[in-house]
């Protein structure tokens, strides 16, 4: 019996996977979306405390300047599908939007479910098949495609797009399986670090204020002697039972991780008061908003998101070693790289 293959198997039903499936439907690319959890978008549903800050209203060039270390790799994808194109796309789905004073964009009702349901409606209307409760167990390259293995059956695909996310919040499905598939197929995996995460301190000046938020906060990363500012970000600072969190702290920790700083001072401002701390430890990577590390982008073509090692294998989003600051940047990276990959697949000849 002859088995027909699907043009594209999208593995992972988070932000990148849902966007990829939507673009595939728009471009007439026959695709199936495969998700290990019972529903799509589990991590999207908890972004920005369930409000879904899906992008930031700024130019593509400003976005690239803000994103930092991965900007050269994602530049083409962002210039083709930057924040304002993403905003226009959601508006075209008749989703009322709300712009915050700093440019962060949310659904007007403040509910992440609105975004996830919009993707679900679009995929339903386009009759895109979705497999849930279907954890992929392996991906085997063949002469004319791939065998995508699952517990109860296998699927033939001409192309595979890995959109499985990072390794934070494993209960929501980000368990590192995409990186494991890539490694088994010969790719290098950049070691994981916590990105956008809180910092631990038992200082009673912080812990006694647990639950308090300072909207006019600020955090600076200083040299060990405290004389030179390496990083400075104005944004909210939250006091927690474990220490410090909030946008200013998250972005400072991201800078520390990318610069691999071992000896530094972080100066945190609580309105008019400021405190300094030395070498605070980040919370575990499983709690991180975003994972630093993943499939090495040196082995991925930035023009197509295709593997340089395994033809017709593609990547999008946090499965790769790309990440951005807090404030809508990481969903934008997921959306733009997903679109880049599917557009390349749409142009690829039949196998």
Image: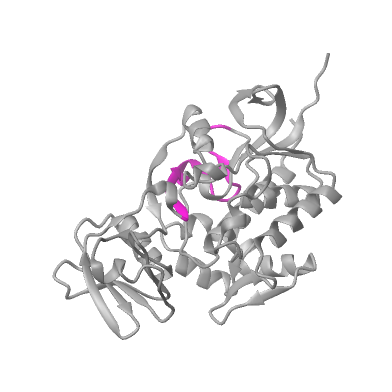
The magenta span reads: 289-310
**Colour style of the rendered protein structure:** one colour
Residue 76 visible to the viewer: no
298 magenta-colored: yes
Left or right of 58 on screen, residue 252: left
285 magenta-colored: no
Residue 226 visible to the viewer: yes
- What residue is drawn where x is 37% and y is 64%? 240
Vertical position of residue 220 compared to residue 298: above or below = below
Hey, which quadrant is residue 270 in on the image?
A: bottom left
Left or right of 2 on screen, residue 82: left
- What residue is drawn where x is 25% and y is 57%? 261
Hey, which quadrant is residue 128 in on the image?
A: top right
- What residue is drawn where x is 78% and y is 43%? 29
Hey, which quadrant is residue 199 in on the image?
A: bottom left
Extreme residue toward the front, this view: 208
- What residue is drawn where x is 38% and y is 78%? 217
Q: Nearer the viewer, residue 246 or 68?
A: 246
Q: Nearer the viewer, residue 103 or 160?
A: 103
Left or right of 7 on screen, residue 67: left
Residue 224: % across, % down: 16, 66
Quadrant containing the C terminus is: top right
Quadrant containing the N terminus is: top right
Q: How many marks?
A: 0
Q: Nearer the viewer, residue 240 or 94?
A: 240
Residue 106: % across, % down: 63, 70
Vertical position of residue 236 compared to residue 111: above or below = below
Residue 43: % across, % down: 58, 51
Q: Nearer the viewer, residue 327 or 286?
A: 286
Vertical position of residue 76 compared to residue 304: above or below = below
Extreme residue toward the bottom, this view: 272
Residue 148: % across, % down: 65, 27
């Amino acid at each position: 019996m002859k088995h027909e293959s699907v043009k594209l198997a999208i593995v992972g039903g988070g932000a990148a996977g849902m966007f990829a499936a939507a673009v595939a439907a728009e471009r007439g690319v026959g695709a199936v979306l495969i998700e290990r959890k019972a529903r799509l978008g589990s991590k999207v549903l908890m972004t920005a405390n369930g409000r879904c800050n899906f992008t930031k209203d700024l130019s593509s060039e400003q976005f690239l300047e803000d994103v930092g270390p991965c900007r050269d790799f994602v530049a083409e994808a962002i210039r083709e599908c930057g924040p304002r194109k993403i905003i226009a796309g959601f508006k075209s789905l008749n989703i009322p939007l709300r712009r915050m004073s700093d440019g962060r964009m949310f659904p007007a009702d403040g509910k992440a479910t609105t975004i996830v349901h919009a993707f679900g409606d679009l995929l339903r209307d386009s009759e895109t098949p979705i497999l849930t409760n279907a954890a992929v167990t392996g991906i085997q390259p063949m002469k004319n495609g791939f065998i995508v293995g699952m517990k109860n059956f296998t699927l033939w695909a001409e192309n595979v797009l890995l959109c499985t996310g990072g390794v934070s919040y494993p209960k929501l499905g980000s368990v590192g399986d995409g990186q494991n598939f890539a490694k088994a197929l010969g790719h290098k995996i950049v070691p994981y670090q916590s990105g956008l995460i809180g910092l631990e301190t038992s200082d009673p000046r912080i812990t006694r204020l647990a639950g308090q938020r300072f909207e006019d906060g600020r955090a600076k990363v200083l040299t060990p002697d405290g004389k030179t500012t390496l990083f400075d970000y104005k944004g909210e600072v939250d006091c927690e039972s474990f220490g410090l969190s909030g946008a200013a702290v998250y972005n400072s920790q991201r800078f520390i991780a990318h610069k691999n700083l071992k000896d530094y001072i972080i100066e945190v401002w609580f309105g008019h008061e400021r405190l300094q701390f030395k070498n605070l430890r980040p919370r575990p990577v499983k709690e991180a908003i975003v994972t630093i590390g993943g499939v090495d982008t040196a082995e991925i073509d930035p023009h197509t998101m295709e593997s340089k090692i395994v033809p017709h294998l593609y990547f999008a989003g946090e499965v790769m070693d790309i990440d951005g600051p807090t404030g809508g940047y990481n969903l934008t990276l997921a959306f733009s790289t997903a679109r880049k990959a599917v557009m390349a697949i749409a142009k690829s000849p039949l196998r």
